[in-house]
Amino acid sequence: MKPADPRYLGAQLTEGGANFAIWAAAADAVELCLFNEVNGQLLETRFAMTHRDGPIFHGYLAGVREGQRYGYRVYGPWNPEEGWRFNPNKLLLDPYAHHVSGELVYSPEIYGHQALTGFGGGDISLKDDRDSAHFVPLGVVTRAERAEIQRLNTPWAKTIIYEAHVRGLTAQNLAIPEKERGTYKALGHPSTINYLKSLGITALELLPIHHFVTEPGIVERGRQNYWGYNALAFSAPHAPYAATDNPIAELREAVRALHEAGIEVLLDVVYNHTAEGGVGGPTLSFRGIDNKTFYRRVKGDLLDDVTGCGNTVDARRPFVMRMIMDSLHWWSETIGIDGFRFDLASALARNDFGIDTNASLFSAIAGDPILRERKLIAEPWDIAGYAMGEFPHPWREWNDHYRDSLRQFWLSNPARGFSEGVGDVASRLSGSHDVFYYRGPTSSINFITAHDGFTLGDLVSYSSKHNEANGEENHDGTDSNRSWSVGVEGPTLDPEINALRDRLIKSLLGSLLLSAGVPMITMGDEIARTQVGSNNAFSLPLNGDSTSSQAFNGGWALNWDRSERENELLETTKNLIAIRNSYLVDVAKEFFTGDLDLGTNRKDLAWFRRNGEEMNSETWHQGDRNHLAMYVDATANQALLILLNAAKHENSFILPSDKWGSSFRSIFDSASHISTFEPKILAPNEPTILPPHSLQVWLVNRG
């Protein structure tokens, strides 16, 4: 092999061939392995990479073309006690691969140690000599130039996020050709875009599309990983999500179509761990290239696992940080992605002593001229620590305080004794100033549900999790759900229970969409999607897929053939988003003060009791209070009055005096059917009745 340019890692096509470069600082030698099919057989040709520039092995091969499959074999010591697990018998995927071909076969050959089965086991100290080449995915040489991107740069105050699964979003959409459903191509289909646009979504956040594989232990239980939080290649779109043999081009085109429709695309990225799992996991890429650099460890072969997935990527290491930065740049500049939600971001922010949100990776991202302009969202915890409110500008954070407080307020069921008053929920509705006091309310990503946990429909239908299908005896998933079945666990024909469940869904959606902060809706919550009580719906049957009737009945896919009830909830969500866009976007950019403005003689925020008088210090601390009135200064001549009654009985609210407005017009009522809702106009000091567990919105005119 001739020398290549070591500045560019991965496979880089040239006019006459391709440059290959891989970082392997502790390796003794590296072989590039090309794979070609001859007479139906996959044949391997090896090339010694004799050129080395410090930690980087590199070489140029003439005649290599786009589509060439390849991998690496890396030589070095096998010394598990010291953390070294080099094994050239194991073919390794290039960490910089942008296209991955083939599936992982769960065979003993994929393990660096002498595994007894395809699921591991055996003595992890003994090196295995069997060749893994025919059992592991291969990298593919690609050509993908920087995209021409129509950046929307939607302000955070105007952003409404829709968290969705690539396959689940369109798998049941009959308007899309069958072979294209559940693919990247389907994301850009007019029916998909029209649905998101009509709903009012400005940002589509996709669950992981890093190329991923299923964990061996899950396969052993007869299941497959559906969500995708098990990355094998950080910079390659998951190939099975493509309708064509070119996932990069397909995804780029879908992103372009979404941009043209005014919708940004965000990715849930999983840089905190890899699919290689713990020390007994398979050797597929990182472990065989440099086990001690890629993974955090306590000492020797003992991994420091703060992700719960067997390993933790060591973002303290300069090369690991570079790899993550290069990956983010690729998604941003080659695919056109507008932002990233970092799964278990705290795991990447750890130094030797704990979580440091100014750690090198996060400082590098915040200072990068490209990445600092993208939308950056942190999940501010890992299984060993919690750092919400600590990530610096320009980061935003998932706000689990918001989730828990709103669930507690609406679903505590006072008969069960869970009520905690209204002070905390008032803080969440007004932007969580107590958490993000120096960064502004748009630092809070507000959510009531997410992929991880109950759906909104299940939140009001189940008091306990039902995860038996995962094969872990229902031990997986959280037991702290703050959910309420309304008296019957699961579906029921009781019309009163169903009416109350729908009222609760509408009240929860109303709270979410009318709060200060950035709202995130989970796919299907707008139509009460159910996962049949699963709060950990990460897996599917091994022999099924997300387009199967079994998966659909389990709620893994969005229902496009909607019932009358689902359409009514959908229209309710659209109406609430329209109210938010009309009255709250401009006034919720900064924290409310609650102070009297001497120029306008108005308060930007006020809270009221049921008697129409402002809250005082005594009423804030009444622990059994489960109703609240929130007054928000909206426009020059109008305000919004949001009434919340979480009690199990109806409550009468007296509207504020003429000091606050000359007339009050109802524009939303969670106890009413959207198609038959009739607005009312009331004068100051008049009463309005709120049924149990309901929310009303009033437009206040000051003229």
Image (spheres, grey):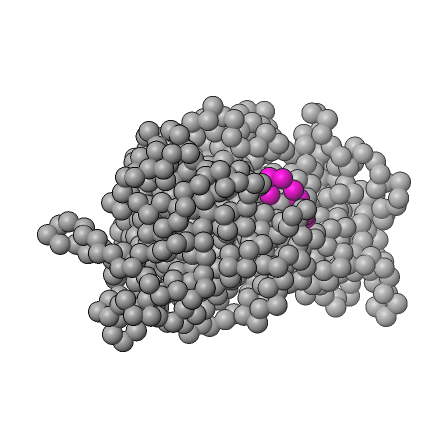
In the picture, the quarter occupied by the C terminus is: bottom right
Q: Is residue 386 above or below residue 599?
A: above
Specify whether 209 is left or right of 665. left
Q: Residue at x 46, y 26 (%)?
A: 472
Expressed as whole percent of the image width and height from the top left, the position of residue 369 reads: 57, 72
Expressed as whole percent of the image width and height from the top left, the position of residue 309 reads: 50, 39
Q: Is residue 236 above or below residue 303?
A: below
In the picture, the quarter occupied by the N terminus is: bottom left
Q: Nearer the viewer, residue 51 or 362?
A: 51
Q: Residue furthest left?
A: 39
Q: Nearer the viewer, residue 448 or 36?
A: 36
Q: Is residue 61 visible?
A: yes
Is residue 384 magenta-colored? yes
Q: Nearer the viewer, residue 495 or 104?
A: 104
Image quadrant in which you'd find residue 304: top right
Q: Nearer the viewer, residue 519 or 372?
A: 372
Specify whether 132 is left or right of 410. left
Q: Is residue 86 above or below residue 542?
A: below
Q: Residue at x 18, y 52 (%)?
A: 43
Q: Is residue 642 visible?
A: no
Q: Residue at x 33, y 63 (%)?
A: 50
Expressed as whole percent of the image width and height from the top left, the position of residue 94 reads: 37, 56
Segment colored magenta: 382-388
- Count of all numbered marks drawn on residues in the image: 0
Expressed as whole percent of the image width and height from the top left, the position of residue 193 reads: 42, 60
Q: Residue at x 40, y 30 (%)?
A: 123
Q: Residue furthest bottom?
A: 15
